[in-house]
Amino acid sequence: MNKGYYGKFGGIFIPETLSFALRELDTLYQDIKNDTTFNNELQDIYIHYVGRPSPLYFAEKYTENIGGPKIWFKREDLNHTGAHKINNTVGQALLAKKLGKKRIIAETGAGQHGVATATICAKLGLECVIYMGETDIQRQELNVFKINTLGAKVVPVSSGTATLKDALNESIRDWVTNVENTHYIIGSVTGPHPYPEIVRDFNSISGKELKDQSIERFEKLPDMVIACVGGGSNAMGVFAPFVDDLNVELVGIEAGGVSDSDIGSASINDGSIGVLHGAKTMILQNNSGEILETSSISAGLDYPGVGPEHAYLADIDRAKYKKVFDSQALDAFYKVSRLEGIIPALETAHAIAYLEELSDINKDKNVVVNMSGRGDKDLYSVMSL
């Protein structure tokens, strides 16, 4: 990989105002990522605060229901705050303290990244501002209340579709204005270098644990690992340790929206190469390069781009990316709740829905779904359908 690039994807496409901050962040991260003291502090928080390692759970009833391979869930939903997002926010908040930045900003769609950022800021005594689209504020009311309860400020964004893309735009504007005292904790493997690398690395703890747990539970690596993909942080985290293990099939699930006639949010399946939020990647755009208005039942997948490393893995055929539609995700949401007693996030429900395609796979195979988050945050949305 060239500096900041994954094949032809990635790079740094930013205002000059942010150049120094990104160089400073990259230099610190490269110096500190193998530092024993830093990693000991990080691991201590992961173990005693986040609750890692997260379990690898055999979904026996779901396995019996589909009549295909053995289905396992990597239970990131059991982390403190209910999702994988805390893995990255803990690491970046510690980096911010090393940089002497006492103000944190972040964007959020489903609200889980906002909650995770507000949580670690409360623990570390950092000022926290969360940008969130007004559309997402309405459908993620519970998480907005959690963020406020944790002492952070939620700033509504009304521009564009008032969803994740627009919240990210406003976060970047804030960062440009306040770069000297502010660190921006991007919530996914998107944005300019070094963010895709940093977010991937902090989230890869799930994939590293999964490798060890797979050997312990079924004495080999998984045959397939499945994860939902919006920007792609949970998927990249669980995929990364397996990229060189070519016998492990990697499957990312994008949000197709209502139907094939809908724009949806499937940037790899339906997009083209362009630049969005500081990186060259696959994005949903029209012939004039204008970003399309996306849609998904899931706030966390409702984004018109994808992390550049995902675009690269698709380009070299190391991972495949499939679409799941709103109705399929909703069916999976109820099915796994009733069969396994686990209410998944609507994002995760997209990944679970893909299991219906696997009934013909050999019953000796082991398929792992990264259970990226729990569904508490989505109950109001589902109740209103």
Image (cartoon, grey):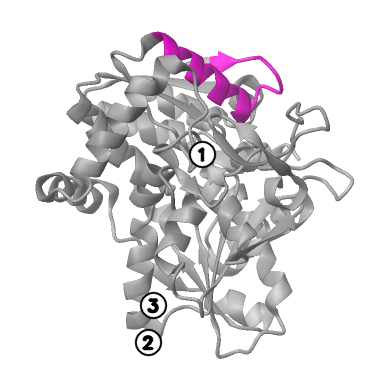
Q: Is residue 38 above or below residue 113?
A: below
Q: Which residue is tagged 3?
A: 214
Q: Which residue is depicted at the point 60% across and 45% down?
A: 230
Image quarter of the C terminus: top right
Number of numbered labels in the structure image: 3
**Range covered by the magenta-colored residues:** 156-177
**Residue 221, can we see it?**
yes
Which label is found at residue 219?
Answer: 2
Q: Is disc 3 placed on a helix, strand or loop? A: helix
Name the side, left or right, on which 201 lies relative to 277: left
Quadrant assignment, res 379: top right
Amino acid tagged 3:
Ser
Mark 1 residue crowding within 10 angstroms, few (<14) / some (14–19) / many (20+): many
**In the image, residue 173 lies in the stretch drawn in magenta:** yes
Q: Which residue is depicted at the point 42% across and 49% down?
A: 84
Amino acid tagged 2:
Glu
Quadrant assignment, res 95: top left
Q: Which residue is tagged 1?
A: 190
Q: CA distance from mark 2 to mark 1?
A: 34 Å
Q: CA distance from mark 3 to mark 1?
A: 29 Å
Residue 384 coordinates in the image, percent (x, y): 72, 36
**In the image, residue 176 lies in the stretch drawn in magenta:** yes
Sequence-first disc among 2 and 1: 1
Sequence-first disc among 3 and 1: 1
Main SS, magenta residues: helix
